Image (tube, helix red, strand yellow):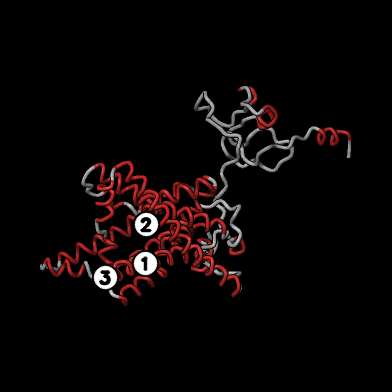
Amino acid sequence: MNEKDKIDNSNEIKLRWSYCPICGTKIPEVKNIKFCTKCGVDLIYINTHMRMPPRNNTISLGPRTSTTYQPYSFRSPRPPRKRLSQENLLNLKEEKLWGSFASIGMTAAAFLLMNSIAILAVIVFVFFSFNLDTIYDILANPYLIIFSSFIELILFIVPMLYIGKYLKKPNLNNRLILLGFTVKGFNNKRILKEILIGFGFAILGVFLVFCVSFLIEVILTVIFGYEIVHDILGTSGEVDVLITSSDVLTIFWLVIIMILIIGTSEEVLFRGFLQKGLVRSLGKNWGILITALIFSSIHLIGIFLFPESLTTFLVSLLLNFFPFFAISILLGLLYNWRKENLIAVMITHGVYNALTIIISFLVFSSF
């Protein structure tokens, strides 16, 4: 190596970027390149001083159309979205997935689509039936409500369709794994453990919601008075009417629906999709909290429709919000503890719903 080559190597400067920080053009892999091949900016000056060079440090590569520089960033352009291979799906802790906007937006879209289909089905049914008594009897039939519960599968389908763009091979198995709905890598002992954890947390959930409901009822009674709170609690809700008009066989099918469809669909959407996205963009605590707020709010939409008075609306909202919020926080913490696997969480949700129906049926049957 001659003396000139030694001097050139000693003065070589390694650039901080692979792309021009002004125009984003790929910088050729050429030793000692000084100017951008497209915009002509002095790359060595920016690399050294971390600021825009004087105009005489920029070469002209064509006719000047503007006397001002375009805004630029010292970061390289955002790389294309990384698609997940099957090997990465069981270890997603460090992977960046969908952001907050997509998490909340797709959740809202799923519920909007589900309710739109339900409303459309009712409108079509009413249109082709002219006997109001018959319409009322059919709509109040528990088996119609059981059948209509299959519409909740939309909450499962929407995130399943959306997440395909994050996968190298977007087949059904990989989509389920990405959402946490999988027993891949589990032996029989581990599966049994998840099932037992699910049942245990379902019982804990019933106790938790009972305590929260009782506490809120006491607080609201002190603030608003016994009569107002008692009147609202004494109003029969949709679930109460369903349970009181059901027999043992109907309750059995309701329990099956709660475990296999309601618990599964809602947990795939809220924990497997919504919470998973929010945790990665906002952090664990905010992700669990915001998921619980959205979960509770969506389940209380009916309270916002045609309130009798401001006081009635407020008391009804508080009586129902905190129990939903409490069980959602429990589910969110369980999902985080089980390392974003949904098996125990889905069982907890489904069995919790089933237990509340069974307990309500037994209570109503006793009076």
Give whichever of 249, 43 is nearer the camera. 249
Element marked by disc 3: helix
Is there CB contact under 8 Å for labels 3 and 2? no
Give the residue number, with chain letter if any, for mark 1: 359
Element marked by disc 2: helix
Residue 271 placement, left or right of 19: left
The residue positioned 41% from the left and 48% from the top of the image is 293
Element marked by disc 1: helix
Q: Residue furthest right?
A: 2
| Dot label at residue 193 | none
The residue positioned 60% from the left and 73% from the top of the image is 189
Q: Residues within 10 Å of mark 1 (few under 14, many from 20)?
A: few
Residue 324 placement, left or right of 303: right
Quarter in which the C terminus is drawn? bottom left
Quadrant of the rendered image containing residue 168: bottom right
Give the residue number, with chain letter if any, for mark 2: 110
Quadrant of the rendered image containing residue 366: bottom left
Quarter in which the N terminus is drawn? top right
| Amino acid type, callout 3 | Pro
